[in-house]
Image (cartoon, helix red, strand yellow):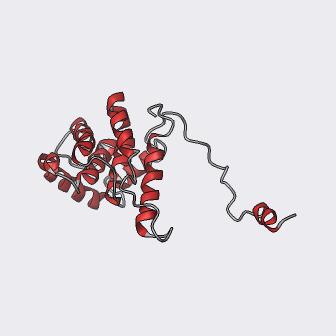
């Protein structure tokens, strides 16, 4: 038996088979799931560990609401995820909102669909909000919306950031993380 076959048999990182694959069409799935959503809402609610910070953040998001669509680049993915998160978690007991759940969802959708018109490809690590927003407001998106956003997510690394001199270069690791997050967002959705 050759040395490499012996080494291969002792794989220090065997595949994790304890978790089932993603169910077809199951959303949300990135960071928040239908199972852990009530726990997150409880932590954000009155008496919850994050209640005060959450209200401060809601107030900030409500202040940005009228201006969100006027942002031209760097904040768009973040804002899309922010308003998608508000839509997903709304209502949180004890939180005071300046807008309805439907308004937060509509703004998140509009911000997501604005992204491809502002930047033709996903090229840097500011774009984590794109797959998060897609996942969190998935039920609000039409098939056309989903196709547009999946096409956008598939442009990760079209700037040719990979491969640099080192596999551990920050651009490489960020690019890989963005690609994996994007792939998880639309896996098994039947869009691609």
Residue sitting at 49 percent across and 40 percent down? 187
View extreme (top): residue: 143
Residue 31 at least partly seen: no
**Number of numbered markers:** 0
View extreme (right): residue: 1
Using residue 18 as the reference point, say whether residue 102 is left or right of it.
left
Q: Looking at the rendering, in which quadrant would you find the N terminus?
A: bottom right
Where residue 139 appears, x then y in whole percent?
Answer: 37, 33
Residue 6 higher or lower than 111, as above or below: below
| Nearest to the observer: residue 131 or residue 44 | 131
Residue sitting at 51 percent across and 36 percent down? 188
Residue sitting at 45 percent across and 67 percent down? 164
Where residue 180 appears, x then y in whole percent?
Answer: 48, 52
Using residue 191 as the reference point, say whether residue 71 is left or right of it.
left
Residue 53 higher or lower than 190, as above or below: below
Where residue 49 appears, x then y in whole percent?
Answer: 36, 61
Residue 172 at least partly seen: yes
| Nearest to the observer: residue 28 or residue 160 | 160
| Nearest to the observer: residue 53 or residue 140 | 140
Residue sitting at 23 percent across and 55 percent down? 75
Quarter residue 134 falls in: top left
Where residue 129 appears, x then y in whole percent?
Answer: 33, 51
């Amino acid at each position: 038996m050759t040395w490499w076959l012996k080494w291969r048999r002792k794989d220090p990182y065997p595949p994790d088979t304890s978790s089932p694959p993603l169910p077809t069409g199951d959303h949300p799935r990135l960071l928040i799931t239908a199972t852990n959503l009530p726990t997150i809402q409880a932590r954000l609610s009155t008496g919850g560990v994050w209640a005060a910070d959450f209200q401060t953040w809601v107030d900030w998001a409500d202040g940005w609401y009228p201006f969100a669509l006027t942002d031209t680049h760097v904040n768009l993915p973040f804002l899309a995820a922010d308003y998608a998160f508000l839509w997903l978690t709304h209502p949180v007991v004890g939180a005071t909102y300046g807008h309805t759940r439907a308004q937060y969802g509509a703004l998140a959708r509009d911000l997501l669909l604005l992204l491809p018109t502002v930047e033709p490809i996903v090229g840097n690590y500011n774009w984590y909000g794109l797959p998060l927003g897609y996942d969190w407001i998935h039920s609000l998106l039409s098939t056309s919306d989903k196709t547009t956003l999946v096409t956008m997510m598939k442009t990760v690394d079209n700037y040719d950031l990979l491969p640099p001199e080192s596999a551990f270069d920050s651009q490489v690791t960020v690019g890989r993380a963005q690609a994996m997050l994007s792939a998880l967002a639309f896996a098994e959705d039947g869009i691609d």
